[in-house]
């Protein structure tokens, strides 16, 4: 047991904690431990695949408000572990850990209110390690941020510091004696890699703003996406600086757009300096901008864009699958599908214009799209992406589609879709924050579900198949429909995986599958209609705006459609009779406040109209007729629909 640090000592360690590689071990990982070389060589050391069971962890995000919704999800996590007996290796939390503006110090009361007193009060959750990353609220980057508050990475470091403030042991191989921490160079890393025993680890863990978790043949890359696009611009400037130095030696011709060259030319026009002095001036300027850290031109080790490229190369060399954990989802069908928020993360307009010009983006756009474009240009394709930011749960996967299909659809892309960037993404932002609706309907064919629910996900990295990742999504109940959902996916498809009871006949399984396919066909038509309208009205069609909006289609209908979609995707299907009756009850037109005030009724493209049309085309009867036909039929009795 080591001496407990003060808040100031913990913060100083946090400031020294550059991106880290953390090798996770347990008592059973003898082979893995023996395969490791010295710590300083760990970054480039292939790690032998483990032979013990697969990596299993739970995921939540957008949770830290200390409200009943967060407590409800925490209780659900505890009950899941108790009921299934599946204790996760850890719980991954993908940001927005303390609402509304993060922590204001390493010993902020928010750590107790939004974490310790929410999760660790449950016996099933007390001894489990939690790995966290930073969200936009954790760095006070949002439209309702505190005036004159500390913002950005410096604020996020308070959450890193809490890791060391609350640590009982030197689990990250960081010297806990403050005198041993280098203070002359804030970019000097006490230790860039370490080995951590999961059996001895518990509580809050954010060892750095950026870090990776390695276990067996899996590496989870955890980044602070709040600064990733700016880091990429700095990385490009670093490359320009290196090319500028080579150019001065006469080895290459340099572009006039090179940032180092442009700065040098502008400076030389204003001041009479020799070339030798100019080199030092340019170097000093790039050090001042924190792009490099010394006269040798060493890149800032906190540059995540360079770090992520290096880690991906090392993981590929070692034969590991890669999962990226970040707060901002590269694909979003939420409110940011039509919302420009880039100025929160790129306050300098020159940076925003530079990104727009580089990626040929015609107008102000969401930061999510910028992140996706950067990943695409870096050619970083992950086996799985885990995100939050959108306060809902959804699964997106375009990986199974052929390159030709993507190429053809890319030519028709209007920069709102993501046809041209290959990804399998699980967004799990239902940890407790106020839920948000779906506004974007592009790429419906790649979306496996959209749940406007609180809940969590279980992720399992298959030990036998190094390319396979399993996802189980668990949603809590929500009003007005008190229904829970459990959906299963993997990274090979966007389609849900269903497990029929062994007692169910093959014929009934086929009938249920056929009926659900017909329902899904109607849902796809409905979402396609909304995609066209939302795109035309720039995201305003679902509102009551008299110019752009409407009164026949709104969030109520969209939510109803998603509930039906989730029901017909549930991992444990109901019998045929129950399925048909339930879909009818969930789909039927109901008078709500809006429809009552405006005296509305179903239109040509309303969900119930499309459902009835598809049912009549397949079965010769509308949905109500099918339901009425089965009104007195007992459950499990074989029925004939056609």
Image (cartoon, rainbow, N blue to C red):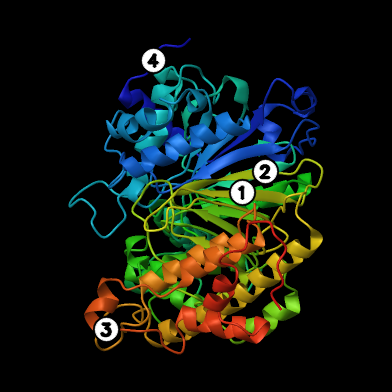
Residue 172 picture location, percent across and down: 54, 26
Q: Earlier in the sequence, mark 3 or mark 4?
A: 4
Residue drawn at x 69%, y 65% is 512
Residue drawn at x 45%, y 76% is 356
In the image, is 30 to the left or to the right of 11? right
Q: Viewer-nearest of labels 4 and 2?
A: 2
Q: Nearer the viewer, residue 204 or 346?
A: 204
Are circles 3 and 4 on residues that touch, CB within 8 Å?
no
Q: Nearer the viewer, residue 540 or 387?
A: 540
Residue 75 picture location, percent across and down: 44, 35
Give the quadrant of residue 389. Answer: bottom left
Total number of numbered labels? 4
> Secondary structure beneath disc 3?
loop
Q: Earlier in the sequence, mark 2 or mark 3?
A: 2
Within-10-Å neighbours for mark 1: few <14, some 14–19, many 20+: some
Furthest-left residue in view? 147
In the rendered image, which residue does mark 3 sit on? 599
Q: Viewer-nearest of labels 1 and 2?
A: 1
- Cα gap from disc 4 to disc 2, whole angstroms: 35 Å
In the rendered image, which residue does mark 4 sit on? 4
Furthest-front residue in view? 632
Q: Nearer the viewer, residue 431 or 111?
A: 431
In the rendered image, which residue does mark 1 sit on? 472
- Cα gap from disc 1 to disc 3, whole angstroms: 41 Å
Give the quadrant of residue 68. Answer: top left
């Amino acid at each position: 047991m080591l001496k407990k640090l003060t808040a100031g000592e913990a913060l100083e360690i946090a400031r020294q904690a550059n991106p880290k590689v953390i090798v996770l071990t347990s008592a059973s990982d003898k082979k893995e431990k023996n395969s490791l070389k010295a710590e300083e060589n760990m970054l480039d050391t292939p790690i032998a695949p483990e032979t013990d069971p697969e990596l299993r962890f739970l995921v939540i995000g957008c949770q830290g408000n200390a409200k009943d919704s967060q407590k409800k999800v925490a209780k659900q996590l505890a009950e899941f572990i108790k009921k299934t007996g599946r204790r996760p290796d850890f719980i991954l939390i993908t940001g927005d850990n303390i609402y509304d503006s993060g922590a204001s110090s390493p010993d902020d009361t928010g750590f107790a209110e939004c974490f310790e007193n929410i999760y660790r009060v449950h016996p099933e959750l007390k001894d489990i390690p939690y790995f966290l990353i930073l969200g936009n609220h954790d760095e006070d980057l949002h439209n309702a941020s505190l005036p004159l508050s500390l913002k950005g990475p410096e604020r996020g470091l308070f959450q890193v510091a809490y890791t060391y403030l609350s640590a009982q042991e030197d689990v990250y191989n960081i010297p806990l004696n403050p005198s041993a921490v280098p203070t002359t160079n804030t970019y000097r890393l006490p230790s860039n890699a370490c080995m951590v025993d999961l059996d001895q680890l518990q509580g809050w863990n954010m060892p750095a703003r950026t870090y990776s978790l390695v276990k067996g043949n899996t590496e989870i890359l955890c980044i602070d996406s709040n600064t990733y696009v700016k880091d990429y611009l700095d990385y490009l400037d670093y490359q320009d600086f290196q090319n500028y130095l080579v150019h001065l030696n006469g080895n290459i011709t340099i572009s006039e757009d090179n940032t180092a060259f442009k700065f040098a030319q502008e400076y030389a026009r204003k001041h009479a300096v020799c070339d030798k002095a100019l080199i030092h001036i340019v170097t000093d300027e790039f050090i001042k901008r924190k792009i490099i850290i010394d006269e040798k031109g060493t890149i800032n080790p906190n540059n995540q864009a360079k770090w992520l490229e290096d880690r991906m190369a090392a993981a590929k060399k070692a034969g590991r699958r890669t999962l990226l954990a970040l707060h901002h989802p590269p694909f979003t069908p939420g409110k940011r599908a039509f919302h420009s928020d880039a100025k929160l993360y790129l306050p300098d307009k020159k940076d925003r214009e530079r990104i727009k010009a580089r990626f040929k983006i015609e107008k102000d756009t969401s930061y999510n799209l910028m992140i996706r474009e950067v990943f695409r240009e870096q050619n970083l394709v992950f086996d799985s992406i885990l995100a939050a930011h959108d306060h809902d749960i959804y699964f997106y996967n375009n990986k199974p589609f052929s390159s030709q299909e993507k190429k053809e659809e890319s030519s028709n892309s209007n920069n709102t879709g993501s046809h041209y960037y290959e990804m399998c993404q699980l967004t799990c932002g239902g940890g407790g924050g106020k839920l948000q609706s779906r506004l974007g309907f592009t790429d419906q064919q790649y979306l496996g579900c959209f749940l406007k629910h609180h809940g969590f996900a279980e992720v399992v990295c298959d030990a036998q198949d190094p390319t396979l990742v399993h996802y189980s999504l668990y949603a809590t109940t929500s009003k007005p429909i008190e229904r829970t959902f459990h959906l299963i996916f993997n990274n090979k498809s966007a389609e849900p995986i269903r497990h029929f009871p062994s007692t169910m006949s093959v014929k009934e399984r086929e009938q249920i599958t056929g009926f659900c396919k017909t329902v899904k066909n109607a849902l796809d038509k409905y979402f396609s209609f909304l995609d066209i309208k939302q795109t035309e009205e720039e995201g305003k069609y679902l509102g009551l705006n008299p110019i752009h909006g409407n009164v026949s289609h709104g969030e109520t209908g969209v939510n109803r459609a998603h509930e039906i979609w989730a029901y017909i995707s549930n991992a444990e299907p109901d019998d045929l009779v129950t399925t048909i009756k339930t879909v009818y009850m969930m789909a039927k037109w109901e008078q709500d406040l809006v429809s009552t005030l405006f005296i509305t009724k179903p239109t040509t493209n309303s969900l119930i109209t499309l459902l009835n049309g598809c049912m009549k085309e397949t079965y010769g009867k509308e949905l109500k007729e099918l339901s009425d036909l089965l009104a007195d039929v007992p459950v499990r009795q074989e029925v004939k629909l056609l």
